[in-house]
Image (cartoon, rainbow, N blue to C red):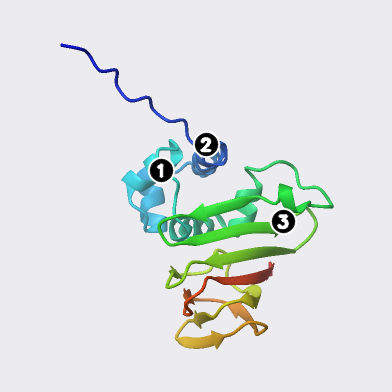
């Protein structure tokens, strides 16, 4: 009988590995156990533990909850695991992150930079994708959403705004938000984020 070699473990994506290390570092800096962070964020201990060991890539919703607890925007957190930002960010060098579970792709067009409060993000949602956040990462965050292609429904607290190509929604985020791709094609939009 021939023996079969066990499947090789695949190494985590380098960005996921750096993100895992940063999440563990932030929790340690606050002196919280996994249980304390789970209580503060509403994310299970198991998910937090696996994310900190780079066994899973956290979803956008999980990252949003952690950003809220740590008082950061998602872009700030992701920029902390990427190289030092340059004044000119070439298209090929703009970091891309995916939430495969929700069909969300996020490109950091103009990542956060020390001394600047604004940033630009390109978001892409697959047809029918639905992305919900239960709270903003930073209360009072200013956002401008400009739809470039497709159709997008953005719900701010309980008010739904249907946006078509060329439309722009301006808002300050205090509560839950939801992004839904409502057309038959992917929705692509530019998100301008300004920290309070």
Identified at 42% across, 62% down, the residue is: 102
Earlier in the chain: of badge 3 and badge 2, it is 2
Earlier in the chain: of badge 2 and badge 1, it is 2
* Image quadrant assignment for residue 39: bottom left
**How many callouts does the rendering have?**
3
Decide: few, some or many residues near mark 1? Use Cα within 10 Å; few <14, some 14-19, many ≥20: some
Identified at 47% across, 82% down, the residue is: 157
Disc 2 target residue: 17
Q: Of the residues tagged 3 and 2, which is closer to the observer?
A: 2
Earlier in the chain: of badge 3 and badge 1, it is 1
Q: Quadrant of the C terminus?
A: bottom right
Between 8 and 172, the one lying in front of the other is 8
Between 16 and 74, the one lying in front of the other is 16
Q: Which mark is residue 133?
A: none
Asked if residue 140 lies left or right of residue 28, the reply is right
Residue 162: x and y in percent read: 53, 87
**CA separation, marks 2 and 1?**
10 Å
Decide: few, some or many residues near mark 3? Use Cα within 10 Å; few <14, some 14-19, many ≥20: many
Asked if residue 30 lies left or right of residue 84, the reply is left
Identified at 79% across, 60% down, the residue is: 116
Q: Residue furthest left?
A: 1
- Looking at the image, can residue 28 be seen? yes
> Regarding mark 1 in the picture, which secondary structure is present there?
loop
**CA separation, marks 3 and 1?**
25 Å
Disc 3 target residue: 112
**CA separation, marks 3 and 2?**
20 Å
Disc 1 target residue: 56
- Looking at the image, can residue 72 be seen? no
Residue 79: x and y in percent read: 66, 49
Against 142, is 110 above or below?
above
């Amino acid at each position: 009988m021939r023996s079969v070699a066990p499947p090789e473990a695949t190494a985590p994506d380098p960005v996921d590995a750096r993100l895992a290390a940063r999440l563990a570092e932030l929790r340690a800096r606050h002196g919280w156990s996994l249980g304390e962070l789970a209580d503060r964020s509403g994310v299970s201990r198991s998910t937090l533990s696996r994310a900190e060991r780079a066994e899973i890539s956290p979803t956008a919703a999980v990252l949003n909850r952690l950003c809220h607890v740590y008082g950061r925007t998602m872009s700030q957190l992701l920029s902390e695991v990427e190289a030092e930002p340059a004044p000119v960010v070439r298209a090929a060098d703009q970091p891309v992150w995916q939430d495969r579970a929700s069909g969300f792709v996020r490109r950091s067009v103009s990542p956060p930079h020390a001394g600047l409060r604004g940033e630009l993000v390109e978001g892409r949602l697959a047809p029918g994708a639905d992305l919900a956040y239960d709270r903003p990462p930073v209360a009072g965050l200013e956002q401008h959403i400009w739809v470039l292609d497709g159709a997008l429904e953005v719900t701010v607290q309980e008010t739904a705004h249907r946006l078509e190509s060329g439309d722009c929604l301006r808002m300050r985020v205090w509560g839950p938000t939801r992004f839904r791709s409502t057309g038959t094609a992917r929705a692509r939009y530019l998100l301008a984020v300004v920290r309070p």
